[in-house]
Image (tube, rainbow, N blue to C red):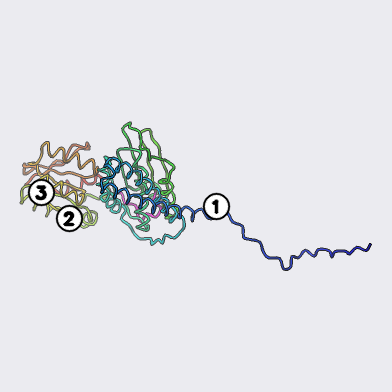
Amino acid sequence: MNTVKKPAPTGLNLGTKPGPEPWSMDAHWPELVGSLASQITEGLAGLQQQLDQLHARERLARPDHMALSAGVQRLRQAGMVAQQIQRFHSGRIRQSHEKIHLAELIEDLLQERRREFATLGVGLRRKLRPADVLMDPTVTYAFVNAAIDWALPFGRRVDVRLDINNWPPHARLQVRATHDGTPASSQADLDGLGWLLIRQIAETSGGIELTRQTHADGVGVTALFTRTVQSVDGMSAIDLADDASSMFRSLQGVYALTVSPSLQIRADVRDALREIGISSDSVVDLAQAREALRHRWPSLIVVDADLRGSDFDAFRRDVGAEQAECAFVEISPDDSAFDMSGFDETSMARVGRGNIRGALGTAVMFELAKAM
């Protein structure tokens, strides 16, 4: 029987169709996260609408509506955070690096969230020194917001501080939440979505270095902004000499509030502050002062000694709880009075009514330097 020999293989697969490209879930997880987050938030929005309608038709009691809505909002927030993480990770965030006055950005954000903090019963304390950074404003705002959101569940008080690190001389933002022994919220999670969002924004920005701290009474996060425009030591670096032009440049941007029932005192203080480059507003009593603080926070409050008393003590405590670095100067009925304050929190500088034009500027410079 004859056998037919098969030709030896040539090593070529001529005419063979290429196989399918390899597929891996690892390469597609960002799309998966984005799709899931979108579906979750859309579905929860519809669920919340249905709950609201049932409550409006009195088919759902108010306590039940509040309890269910709280759960929906927690899930919706998680979906929104996941969406943010996905957007920052995808690289679709277009950044425009601009010079940002970081203290002003943070203060504006905190003012926007004041009502939220009050509703949650969270005490807020800030100490913000001037610092300019080259960052995208939207990315920076999102980062600060995320840091506060992450810290909030861990305590009943949040401290926000901004200064310049000793070395390297970078703007340093510290957000810390502390508690008084009460357990943290069920939403508190050191390594959860909130922390992942902070890390991703810092990575996307390319200009933020992060460290995290855990303490017996709470948690904290520190961010160093590596693209700090310049080191600003604050008012303590001001030369208290007679160089009025130098003083004027240093104090531009400082805002003061004068509280006095006397029109003459308010006018004299305004003129004295204007001479050293400080803009100011004035009100006649502590009630008006509280209302003024709802719209803008000053670096300095000049108060008439006639308003001293228990109401003023309560006012000053409230101001200190909100803005620790706010300085106070008292206008004394003793025309020739001039006393610098000590370094405890309760003392104040005093300037006599007849000595406002001659001494208020010096007292203000000292108080601002000490506060900063």
Residue 186 place in picture, x, y as percent: 37, 38
Q: Amino acid at mark 3?
A: Ile
Nearer mark to the viewer, of 3 and 1: 1
Residue 271 figure quarter: bottom left
**Secondary structure category for the residue under label 2:** strand
First-in-chain label (3 vs 2):
2
- Figure check: 74 above or below 248: above
Q: Which residue is mark 2?
A: 279
First-in-chain label (3 vs 1):
1
Query: In terms of depth relative to the viewer, which is nearer, 174 or 243?
Result: 174
Q: Which residue is mark 3?
A: 356
Confirm or deny contact between disc 3 and disc 2 (CB under 8 A): no
Judge the density around disc 2: few (<14), some (14-19), many (≥20) Cα neighbours within 10 Å: some
Judge the density around disc 3: few (<14), some (14-19), many (≥20) Cα neighbours within 10 Å: many
Nearer mark to the viewer, of 3 and 2: 2
Q: Which residue is mark 1?
A: 26
Query: In terms of depth relative to the viewer, which is nearer, 69 or 149?
Result: 69
At x 41% / y 48%, what residue is drawn?
A: 198
Q: Is residue 231 magenta?
A: yes
Q: CA distance from mark 3 to mark 2?
A: 16 Å
Residue 133 place in picture, x, y as percent: 35, 55
**Secondary structure category for the residue under label 1:** helix
Residue 294 place in picture, x, y as percent: 19, 49
Q: CA distance from mark 2 to mark 1?
A: 57 Å
Q: Which residues are magenta?
A: 224-234
- Figure check: 286 above or below 184: below
First-in-chain label (2 vs 1):
1
**Secondary structure category for the residue under label 3:** helix
Query: In terms of depth relative to the viewer, which is nearer, 334 or 32?
Result: 32
Query: In terms of depth relative to the viewer, which is nearer, 223 or 202?
Result: 202
